[in-house]
C-alpha cells in the first residue's frame, strides 16, 4: 500500500538555489517545486482573509499570484528567508484585492485607503475611552480633517451592497419576505391622472353630442351599438362622430405639445 506523497521539507539553501535557477533560466521544474512547497502557506493566509466571505477561491488565486511575484522578486543576498519576504507579499496582494474589488460602487482610492484606518481608530478609541468616539476624536487620532472622516464613513456604507433577495423576518411567527418584495414600483394611476388632465384641457373643443359619445364609449365602456341606442342615433353615426371627436382631441393635444416645445426652446 503506497503512502500519499508529501511536500519535502527543504532548507533555506535549497529554496534559494531553486529561486535563483528560476530567475536565471525560467525553469518550469524549479517554479513547480517552489509552488508546491508554498501552496499550503498561501492557502492558510487565504483562509484567514476569506472568513465570512463567499470568494475564497478568488482570494486563493490572488495569493498564488503573490507567490509567483515573490519568486521573481526575492533576492537571497538580503539574508532573510524567502518566507519572511513571501508572507507580506501575499498579504499585500490579498488586501489590495479586497480593497479594490469588493466595493459595491466605485469610490476614490483615498477613501479605500482611509476606510480601514478609520475602522481601526474606532476600535482603539472605543476600547480606550469605553464609548464610541466622536468625529473630531477620530480625525485627531488619524491626523486628518473631520470632513474626510465624515466622507469616508458615509461612503464606507457602499462597501457591500445588500441583495434584493435577502430574507427579512416579518412578525413574531417567523414569516419572511425578500427586500425585492417591499421595493416600490411605478404606479400606473399617476399616468392615468396625467392623461385625464390632458384630455380635460382640450375636452371643451368637442360638441355636446361628441362629448356624450366619448363619455359613453370610453368612460362608461359602452359599445357603439349601445351608445347609439342610448342617444337615439345609428351605430354608423356614433362611429363617425367618435372618429371626428378623437381627431379633434389628438390635433389639439399635438398642437399643445408643439407649443410647449417651442416655449422651452425660447
Image: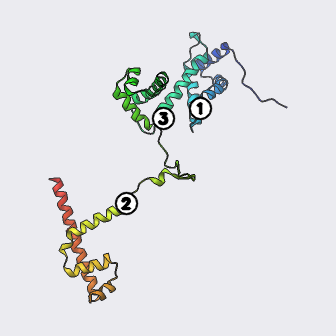
Observer-side mark, 1 or 2, equals 2
Element on which disc 2 rests: loop
Residue 60 numbered tag = 1
Would you say residue 227 is visible in this rendering? yes
Question: Marks 3 and 1, how far apart in space?
Answer: 14 Å
Query: Residue 224: horizontal and vertical position, in percent?
Result: 32, 83
Residue 11 numbered tag = none
Q: Is residue 165 above or below residue 114?
A: below
Q: Is residue 173 above or below residue 76?
A: below
Name the foreground residue: 161 vs 15.
161
Name the foreground residue: 153 vs 11.
153
> Dot 2, crowdedness within 10 Å: few (<14), some or many (≥20)?
few
Query: Residue 87: horizontal and vertical position, in percent?
Result: 58, 21
Observer-side mark, 2 or 3, equals 2
Instruction: Tell me if 129 is positioned left or right of 143 in this view.
Output: right
The quadrant of the picture occupied by the N terminus is: top right
Amino acid at each position: 500500500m503506497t503512502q500519499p506523497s508529501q511536500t519535502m521539507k527543504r532548507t533555506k539553501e535549497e529554496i534559494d538555489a531553486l529561486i535563483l535557477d528560476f530567475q536565471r533560466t525560467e525553469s518550469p521544474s524549479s517554479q513547480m517545486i517552489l509552488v508546491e512547497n508554498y501552496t499550503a502557506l498561501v492557502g492558510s493566509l487565504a483562509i484567514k482573509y476569506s472568513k465570512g466571505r463567499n470568494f475564497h477561491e478568488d482570494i486563493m488565486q490572488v495569493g498564488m499570484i503573490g507567490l509567483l511575484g515573490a519568486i521573481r522578486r526575492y533576492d537571497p543576498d538580503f539574508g532573510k528567508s524567502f518566507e519572511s519576504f513571501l508572507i507580506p507579499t501575499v498579504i499585500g496582494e490579498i488586501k489590495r484585492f479586497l480593497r479594490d474589488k469588493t466595493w459595491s460602487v466605485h469610490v476614490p482610492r483615498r477613501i479605500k485607503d482611509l476606510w480601514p484606518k478609520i475602522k481601526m481608530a474606532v476600535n482603539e478609541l472605543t476600547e480606550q475611552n469605553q464609548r464610541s468616539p466622536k468625529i473630531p476624536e477620530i480625525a485627531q487620532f488619524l491626523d486628518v480633517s473631520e470632513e474626510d472622516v465624515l466622507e469616508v464613513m458615509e461612503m464606507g456604507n457602499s462597501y457591500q451592497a445588500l441583495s434584493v433577495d435577502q430574507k427579512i423576518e416579518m412578525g413574531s411567527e417567523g414569516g419572511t419576505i425578500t427586500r425585492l418584495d417591499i421595493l416600490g414600483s411605478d404606479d400606473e394611476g399617476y399616468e392615468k391622472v396625467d392623461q385625464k388632465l390632458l384630455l380635460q384641457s382640450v375636452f371643451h373643443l368637442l360638441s355636446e353630442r361628441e362629448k356624450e359619445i366619448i363619455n359613453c364609449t370610453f368612460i362608461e365602456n359602452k359599445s357603439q351599438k349601445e351608445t347609439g341606442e342610448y342617444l337615439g342615433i345609428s351605430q354608423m353615426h356614433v362611429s363617425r362622430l367618435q372618429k371626428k371627436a378623437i381627431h379633434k382631441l389628438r390635433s389639439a393635444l399635438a398642437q399643445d405639445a408643439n407649443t410647449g416645445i417651442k416655449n422651452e426652446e425660447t
